[in-house]
Image: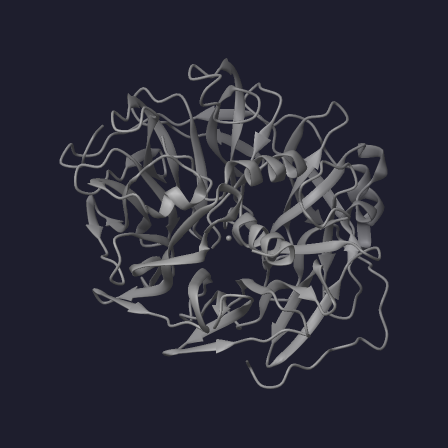
Amino acid sequence: MNKNLTVATNVVMLLVGLGIPVVLVAQEHQKHSLHYKVIDTGSFGGPSSHLTLGAHILNNNGTFTGYADTTEPDPYAPDECWDGNCLVAHAFRWSHGKLTELGVVDSGPNSESNWLSENGLIAGDSQNGLLDPLVGFWQIRGVLWRGNETIEVGTLDGGYDSLARGVNTKGEVVGLSTTLVPDPNAMIMSFGLPYAFQTRAFRWKNGHIQDLGTLGGPDAMALGVNESGQIFGNSYTSSDPSPVCGNPDFGFDSLTTGAFLWQNGKMTNLGSLGGTCTNAITINNRGQVVGYSFLAGDAVFHPFLWERGKLVDLGTLGGNQGVAQRLNEAGDIAGWESLAGNEDVIHATLWSHGQITDLGAIEPDQCSVPFAINSRKQIVGFVSPNCDFTNEDSSLQAFLWEPGHPMVDLNTLISPSLGIQLRNAVNINDRGEMVAVALFPDGNRRPVLLIPCDENDRGGCLDSSSLSAISSTKVPFSSVPRSLTSSRLKSESVPPNLRARLAGRDGSRVYTPR
């Protein structure tokens, strides 16, 4: 695999046409007038708190979820530290100034959250204190946090591990579960994790867990669900090998992979752009799905939009690589693509109504990567001078882009007296509130909330920016009927070395792209 394709593929795994492309160039840029109040959501006594990249962790009510350090050493250290500090970390819910500590399953020490619905349901994972006898790692179970309940979703076919990747307001939880069937090409093996057993997509609702099947191959994983109950994910389509669906860092060739939509009891293959690897990344409530697909020959990959039975190549502005990562309810899509003539540089990109906009970067020769888009087409993410995503640097900057404005460093829109560096903006809701990863003066990283200042009281808003600790409460574990299997998968679905690179940059876990 050539260097450019390897770099681009790594970025895909790092994060995971509509007419003729048209370059949009704003004729006049208005100066940003918005500024933001910064709220430190705190921790449970430990130095850091964390979030899951690529996940919906901030809703339109201003509720935010993540997981935070306690002061207790991780009992599974040093082999299986849940976070970089090797401290026990628990999932939390932050709402209206209050940090609530969520429960864990049985005697498991650690938990994390991966998805937040608009009505406050949270899907995530928890250790349960038991060892997986098949692989020698500590077990992890998918969890639904509903009010004061911590509900374990169980596993499929006697497997020992599951991960919850999404939940809608109806309480439908989706994710992936290991089974007891040996599989040398298991999907999670392609991420460098030692679970050589079949992985199956599941849907859980009201205490019942359901295997969604596959597209013909042995493995599948569900990555999200919308309000209509449509579930999307990825699945092997056969036992044919694919050199580009695997993990180039580990020299691991995977099987031919396709994206699926599951609805009304049926799994549908979304098709491909001619190559052996297609991956879906997110869905909206209209049933539109976006992601990336390799073209015939597996030399390059392009972003796609699937809608009403048709997979469409969104196109690029001349580069060979592109990924569609996020979309809003209007169908506006944020992603990235490589630059024509310089495939090592990637820029955040907007696809909207058949037109493509290169969002650029803050400085020349930087790479920019988006993580979220809201209904106003505001897009957030980060820029980096090290486009190979391998070197630690202190110049990572969180960005905001919105129509009619150039990309801006979010650090210029907060009070400099706070002494923090916003390294990555990962979520933005329709009210313009954001979650960003902040590097603090003591070297610790924690997510912070950015609240737009009232235009009439900008000075007072900035002066009142708070980095004080938030009071917290605990929510106890509440078990579910034992008809569900009671019994460690890493929640990150990217190679450990890439995970470490990104963790060094923004202090956060990486989520299976969605």
The residue under the point 37% across, 60% down is 257
Q: Is residue 171 visible?
A: no
Above or below: residue 486 compared with residue 3 = above
Q: Residue 4: where, in percent of width, then height?
A: 64, 57
Left or right: 494 with respect to 216? right
Residue at screen point 71% across, 42% down: 423
Residue nearest the viewer, comparing 49 with 368: 368
- Residue 58, position as x, y percentages in the image: 54, 48
Task: Pick whichever, 202 or 95, lies toward us.
Answer: 202
Residue 302 image point, x, y percent:
55, 69
Q: Is residue 349 left or right of residue 60?
A: right
Relative placement, left or right, of 111 versus 509 is left
* Location of residue 491 by image quarter: top left
Q: Quadrant of the N terminus?
A: bottom right
Residue shown at the point (55%, 38%) measured from the top left: 499
Q: Residue 50: x percent and y percent?
A: 56, 34
Which quadrant would residue 128 be assigned to in this image? top left
Q: Nearer the viewer, residue 465 or 387?
A: 387
Q: Residue furthest bottom?
A: 19
Where 467 sits versus 226, above or below?
above
The residue sitting at the left extreme is 483
Q: Quadrant of residue 306 in the image?
A: bottom left
Can you see residue 107?
yes
At a point 77% along the width and 60% down the height, the residue shown is 407
435 relative position to 33: left or right: left
